[in-house]
Image (spheres, grey):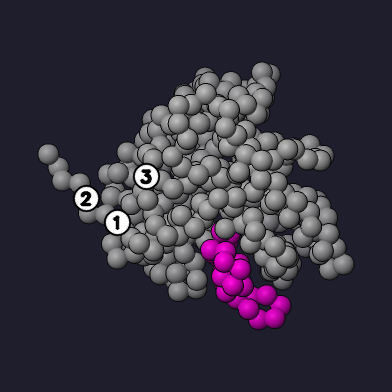
Amino acid sequence: MEAHPISAAGKFAEELIATARGIAAAGKGILAADESTGTIGARFKPINVENNEENRRRYRELLFTSSGIENYISGVIMYEETLFQKSKDGTPFADLLKKKGIITGIKVDQGLKPLPGTNDETACTGLTGLPERCDKYYAAGARFAKWRAAYRIDVKTGKPSHLLIQEQAWGLARYAAICQAHGLCPIVEPEVMIDGDHDIETAAKISERVYSAVVRALHDNGVLLEGALLKPNMVTPGQECTVKATPQDVAFVTIRTLRRTIPAAMPGIMFLSGGQSEEEASLHLNAMNVKDLPFPSPNPWALSFSYGRALQASCLDAWLGKDENIKAAQDAFLVRAKANSEAQLGKYAGGKSDGKSLYQKGYTY
């Protein structure tokens, strides 16, 4: 029988566990501010803000200096450019956040590329040079990382294929092992996307296949599960499905899927919003954290958030790139941060929302 590999965490084991637990703290979650240069440009375009480095810096500073952000946000994921930027008073962003007790993270994948042998499917890339990049990011103050693997459902064409599921599971696991060996707590992000007309049970079936493959690969690569976090999709019907799901439906099917696949050793499940509206993302998270779901015992992991669009849409609309709107923009951001903090505790009663869809077909960032 083959021996289990030595843990990838090595000398960083205790630090990784502390980081994972800190991020998964009660009532807190992650601000995913890791949009690539191209993606943040798409966010800026509707509000007529030029996509240049200074405007990107100004916007991220707006978010990070919001008064009381530390009450709701435990970690911030950055794009590489942002990690090495500073506030207008010269303070590195990582130091600014550390003073607030917020942990800095970094997006380390290098995007989706075509996977030969599949029907136009794409797989995540970025393992080449990752150890050296991890050392650089750790030195700059980052303590966790993320890597996004995306899967599209198309029942007619057999997507996601077995090849894609296996390829991306291995990529996520190798990324996680490398990060742990270099001091970064890995956020493992298998996103089964909402593109399509499939129903919620189809989404659940595919999500189970994906998550199971990922967990097996994590074990095979010696990843310390206690020093890692999962960032999965919530299980919802496809965007074009005519049968809609209630928040209670989404909560039940999502938790059932996680209980079937994810080990209790992982401290936290930090959901992505995946194109849900701001209010939907909060209501769905809240429904997972109330105490009336028909499961026999409390969930073994914290159920929290790692939202990008669902934390920032109202903020961007309020900002419009103008300094005089900074306070209003920060207030809008904090409204959503507080809503999701309450949802993590199962105490969100719902709020005002314009219901604006944040869905983008084929979102790759």
Residue designated by label 3: 265
Q: Is residue 211 visible?
A: yes
In terms of secondary structure, where does tag 1 sit? loop
Which residue is rendered at x = 51% and y = 51% of the image?
24
Q: CA distance from mark 3 to mark 2?
A: 17 Å
Which residue is rendered at x = 72% and y = 49% of the image?
336
In terms of secondary structure, where does tag 3 sit? loop
Crowd rating for badge 2 (residues with CA inside 10 Å; few <14, some 14–19, many 20+)? few
Q: Amino acid at mark 2?
A: Pro
**Are the residues at dot 2 and dot 1 in contact (C-beta closer than 8 Å)?**
yes
**Are the residues at dot 3 and dot 2 in contact (C-beta closer than 8 Å)?**
no
Crowd rating for badge 1 (residues with CA inside 10 Å; few <14, some 14–19, many 20+)? many
Q: Magenta stretch: give its range.
A: 75-104
Residue 5 bears which disc, if any?
2
Residue designated by label 1: 8
Q: CA distance from mark 1 to mark 3?
A: 16 Å
Q: CA distance from mark 2 to mark 1?
A: 8 Å
**Are the residues at dot 1 and dot 3 in contact (C-beta closer than 8 Å)?**
no
In terms of secondary structure, where does tag 2 sit? loop
Q: Is residue 229 left or right of residue 95?
A: left
Q: Is residue 115 left or right of residue 88?
A: left
Residue with the most extreme right position: 324
